[in-house]
Image: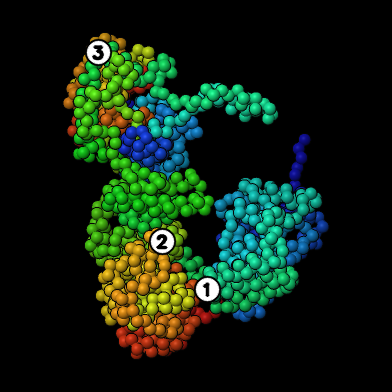
Amino acid sequence: MTTTRTPPETETVGTLATERLDGGIVVVTLDVPGAPVNVLGPRVRQDVSALLDRLESDPSIRAAVLTSGKPDVFIAGADVEELLGLETAADAERLSREGQKLLQRLEDLRVPVVAAIHGSCLGGGLETALACAYRIATDDPKTGLGFPEVQLGLIPGAGGTQRLPQTVGLRAALDLILTGRTVRGRQALRLGLVDELVHPAILRDVALDRARALADGRLSPSQGRRRRGVADFLLDENPAGRAIVLRRAREQTLARTKGHYPAPLTALDVVATGYHEGDERGYFAEARKFGELVVGEVARELTFLFFATTALKKDPGVAAPAPDPLPVEKIAVLGAGFMGAGIAAVAALQQTLVRLKDTDDARVGRGLRAARDVFEERLKKRRLTRPQFQDLLALVGGTTRYSGFGNVDLCIEAVFEDVALKQQVLREAEAVLPPDAIYASNTSTIPIGVLADASRRPEHVLGMHFFSPVPKMPLLEVIVTPRTSPTATVTAVAYGKRLGKTVIVVNDGPGFYTTRTLAAYMNEAGFLLDEGVSIEAVDRAMVDFGFPVGPITLLDEVGLDVAGKVATVLSEAFGARMPRSRSLQRVLEAGRTGRKGRSGFYLYDKRGKKGAVDASVYTLLPTGPTRLDRPAGEMQQRLVLAMVNEAARCLDEGVLRSPRDGDVGAVFGIGFPPFRGGPFRYVDAVGAPRIVKQLEELEARFPDRFAPATPLLRMAARGERFYPERGKPV
Amino acid sequence: MPLASPGRRVAIVAGVRTPFTRAGTLLRKLSAIELGKLAVAELLQRTSLDGKAVQALVFGTVVPDVLAPNIAREVSLLPMLPKGVQAVSVSRACASANQAITDAADQILLGHVDVAIAGGAESLSRVPVLHSRGFSDALVGASRAKSLGGRVRSLATIRPRDLRPITPAIAEPSTGETMGESAEKMAKLNRISREEQDQLALRSHRLAAAGTADGRLTEEIAPVWIPPDYTQVARSDNGIRDNTSLEQLAALKPVFDRRYGSVTAGNSSPLTDGGAAVLLMAEDAARALGYEPLAYIRSYAYAALDPGEQLLQAPVLAAPVALQRAGLTLADIDLVEMHEAFAAQVLSNLQGFESRAWAERAGFSQPVGEVDRARLNVMGGSIAIGHPFGATGARITTTLCHELRRRDGQFGLMTVCAAGGMGFAMVVERA
């Protein structure tokens, strides 16, 4: 005797597939057609609304499971492009209200819905999950939950600021919303963000089981975190404790954002509103503030950076038709200094075999140690298991000889910045590298063409300018010469992306793009010291403008010797526009090298921790110990315009391919304030005519340094912008 | 019948080892698995071989890690090797790495694989310390007990004497005789004098020191930066004494027979840490991958005798068989590498090569012959270089192949004695 089972009915409407199983259980799979990830655009909202109608009206349905059809993504969040199309705060507020109402319907639904989460569950995705009756996540490392909205200058806009504190408590909610960080499954379970953690293979089965139990009344809907601890009771569960938590969070956030980023503080207010005035007022506040932020300047610039970096991820680095990149399975790193070791470490983290060469045992040993430190940090943070840690160590093979170069795909040279040395090392390496290996120099200043002159295969030579510390800095500047082959370029770009870097491709020239524009800015800081302004005043002005550290602090960090070399190369290249500051020269001549030598413009203790300004340094400066004041606004204008003007020249000379690359390079490479978008975005925000006028005024006071660059003059004359005023910027 | 006859020859392409360091010194914190990984990782780095080409890994060790008994598999899980590399650990006492090499070579000859890594590693700084039988029984009993009372009763059977830890000695399980006692017995049976032994030890140190000084020995060594600080580097074997003298050696007291003995710490191989590996390929695979082999394996043989007799004399039985299989005689051999467990054993083995009685025991009418000392262990041996049991066979193979090339010789013979009364011999032919 055979029994026939009716196959489950599956019905696909737009972005949602609904599968009806026995016992009145439906599995709803979100799968936005033609998109790599699920984002909550208008179509999804419309389909979800229709689904809710059906679930409400069909009495045969008893429970539902919500899952994703995308590999390793549950729901990645809101549709950022849709947000960009919003013109007024009222429009944005309306969108937020619409989202809130939709998720309120989901929460209030007669039918319990279980969220089965594997992969990214971010922003609106997490808000959707929070509105479900029960949440199950996988213990896979690809599963991550969070509210990244603040990173775009926004706050959660579909009820997240209210539901998250209700689910996980105030402190955990603030931590997630204010930092935008993502938590893995294990931590999500601990926080009470999800109710269960399972292996991906049984996610669906467990979710179905839970859905049935909820339908049968054997299981209650999620209550969020079970509150147990004394701290929970004292801080999260009573108004006095919450007041303390909110005040402390405000202080910490202000210290971190320095008042430049409104979103985290706004989120704090909105969360507090929910506690003080109830859910209803909380939701209203959330929608109103979301609306204001969406059309605000900071969100606009941060969204631009999001699109710019997303576009760069798809950019192969050369004009179409781009050749395929060559595979990179083994790299050689020449020079085991801090840079070389950092490159070796990030390469190993991507499973690349590394040959790390330096001239003696002690240097190689220090390099191996520095690479190990990078791995150890990840081990401590549990981002690596011990076996993975051991594997990484095994991938980095130290040597003092040119052995094991026969199967190297990419050789990255990171020796001291000296043309003769770099040329000699290139020749030595080429003798042992396979003929099709790509040779990259990690130089910040030396023109790649000069190095390529020493090569027998200049078509394989380019620059890969990493930033220090390599594992933390997000930018890679790839420098190509007219002789560099497209294959070499696309390979370096593709490998840089594999290392997790945002990669810009620039044409060769003294200082390329980042070093050159940074040098213009740093030089101007040096001139301020020459004129007699105090070190603190210069640094404070630029930190207030939004730079992460002041220029003089940065000089100490980079090393005065290195900065001096750069200044020399660039003053030779650009003449009167970039003369060398006397202050830097004199301090360097006095034998100070900055933090690494524990002696620079600031005081350092034995371990290199920075203290106050070293007052004795003033006796070395041109005006001696007497210091004068300059308005912060004037200092900011001089430094920033020096940088902006130089960036515009880079665009004019073809060093830069686009303003986009210039903005991304300045923000991620040299610390241009992200909320200002980058030098070209800054010109657009201020207006080219005003920038030109300011430059002309400065040029009158400081001849040869501030003559406006051609593109700025042209734009001012024609009333043009670098980016379109509305819509998607790139 | 030479191994080359089916038209397929096994090429020894390269060999790399860690420095061999005295137990308790530089490499003391590294396990045998870690030492093996260091040797194999550097072998792959130096040869610029794509790990994906490797199909099998065979590794030897004598004192295995109880928690990770298949050292070969652990080593083969190095990140630059594919997870599909099948791996097996072998154990033939001091000839374990030789066993690894011949097993891998056989797999290549059979056509099962084209590229294999073979070697071995040992940490004698990290030998496992065991509990007594009584203590183990009580613990096992307690873990199986169903009630608290049962657990307590079981643990109550532990007596103070049970708490004394047991360190494994290098003794024959079948006879209870330690290795040193066996060497002492061989010295007496074969009438090897103390002075002859000390002379051989001195020679071993002098030649090894010369090989280190001129870089011939260090060429095959992968420097080891010692984790976690990497400030110390082990670059060469640290047991070699270039300044020792016959007088100093003569001053040492016999260890195993204080009254009539002649075997001392000075004329024995020391307890040593180290790992070693060789890259083996089918001849045509080597050519296809663009490698010039160091040498080909021409033949090998294992032999054994009663461990209660002369424990370390079996190379005398293996060598004539290996030579016969190679179709060669000792006269054809340009270099001989003989593992030096003890000077008394080396001298006994050499004496056995010349003996008609030993030849007959091996089934031959003529003895192997007298080994020309100028061709024997020309860069010293295990007495000076050290002897991490599981690794030595790979070290000798690499040293022999390199030196054969340097001297432009054609054939090399190696022999290794092993516990259990076993012996090994192999003939290699320069490529």
Q: Which residue occupies the foreground of this view, A329 or B355?
A: B355
Give how far across and how far down residue B340 sits, in percent.
28, 25
SS class, disc 1: loop
Q: Which residue is mark 3?
A: B191
Which chain does tag 1 point to?
A
Which chain does tag 2 point to?
A
Q: Which residue is mark 2?
A: A469
Which chain does tag 3 point to?
B
Dot 2 alpha-carbon crowd within 10 angstroms: few under 14, some 14 to 19, many 20 or more: few
Q: Which residue is mark 1?
A: A258
Res. A647 visible in picture: no
| Amino acid of disc 2 | Pro
- Alpha carbons under labels 1 and 2: distance apart: 23 Å
| Amino acid of disc 3 | Arg
Q: How many marks?
A: 3
Give how far across and how far down residue A255 sits, in percent.
53, 70
Give how far across and how far down residue A711 sits, in percent.
39, 82
Q: In the rendering, which numbered label is found on residue A54?
A: none
Q: Horizontally, is B297 left or right of A173 in the view?
A: left
Q: Residue at x 33, y 45 (%)?
A: B232
